[in-house]
Image (cartoon, grey):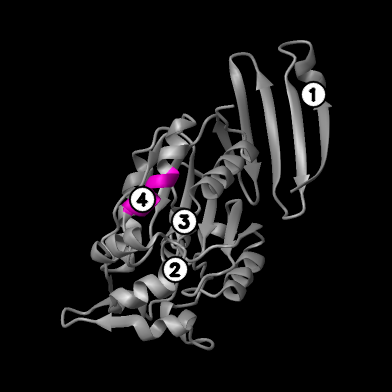
Amino acid sequence: MNQFLIVLIEPELAGKNEAINARSDRADGHYAQELLLPGGTYSYISHKEQKYVQSPPNFVLIHGAWVNGSCWSGVIQRLQEAGYHVTAPQLPLTSLAEDVARVRQVLAAQSGATILVGHSFGGAVISQLGTGAPNVVGLVYLSALAPDKGETMKSLFSGGPQPASVAALRPDNQGFFWLDPEGFVQFLAPDVDAVQARVLTAVQQPIAASEFLGEEPFGEPAWQSLPSWYLVSEDDQMLPAPVQHFFAERMGATTSSIAASHVAMISHPDEVADLFMKVAQQLGGSRE
């Protein structure tokens, strides 16, 4: 949220191209700066480094465990209708390294500034990118893990009381965790239409137990050097809201809340897409 807006005329530019330098200081320690130049508007958000954004940015949406890229369908439709380019890749969910490599591959293929979104376990994946996040100018976390340097997946899940949803975990003999059908509907998608929830159950993508409970320490997280936003799902039964608030506060993220389950992008696509577009606007890239 902006605290104030100062518009400055740069003396050395005023007589040449009338460039205007507008700076918006924010409570989270980031600042936005916009240069109005002949031929276009260029903006950047800075935390520890400056990244220029030429509107509009791309969106790359990263799913979590037990769903796949199609979980973003409603949000994708709305973003595309607004004129944004969107990619929602499928993660293998076989190891953290392979998931991170897939995301880097997709990011490198983007043409221009990109907003990277992580849902659930996808938040751990985008955090692990560190400073190696090509084209990324901002991060959005949705009901997501946001580990810090030195933490492990195992420590994140063993550091406090377990949610009731752990009773729905079903390991198979190949080393993957699934959610049983009843638990999927009850804990992961209770606010999704029952018919649609059963379809989601049928197409769920399991996650490797070795990844879900991995003991490899995370490196310097991407949120340390990129402006970040967090959407807390207050009715989440997979990742409790207090845990989400903890992550958001620790990150210094711009935080919003929604009365939704773990899959707000499915049950509330309008609100989620609206937030993403507001982030794009704050970063200087908008179709409006």
Marks 2 and 4: in contact by CB < 8 Å? no
Find the magenta span and give its range. 69-75
Residue 10: mark in rendering? 1
The image position of residue 277, as x and y in percent, is 56, 40
Q: Amino acid at mark 1?
A: Glu
Residue where numbered disc 3 is placed: 267
Between circles 1 and 3, the one closer to the viewer is: 3
Nearest the eye: 62 or 76: 76
Which SS class for mark 2? loop
Nearest the eye: 176 or 238: 238
What crowding class fits label 3: few (fewer than 14 Cα within 10 Å), some (14-19), or many (20 or more)? some
Marks 1 and 2: in contact by CB < 8 Å? no
Q: Residue at x 57, y 32 (%)?
A: 285
What crowding class fits label 4: few (fewer than 14 Cα within 10 Å), some (14-19), or many (20 or more)? some
Image: 220 above or below 269: below
Earlier residue among tags 4 and 2: 4
Earlier residue among tags 1 and 3: 1
Question: Residue farthest to the left?
Answer: 173
Residue where numbered disc 2 is placed: 190
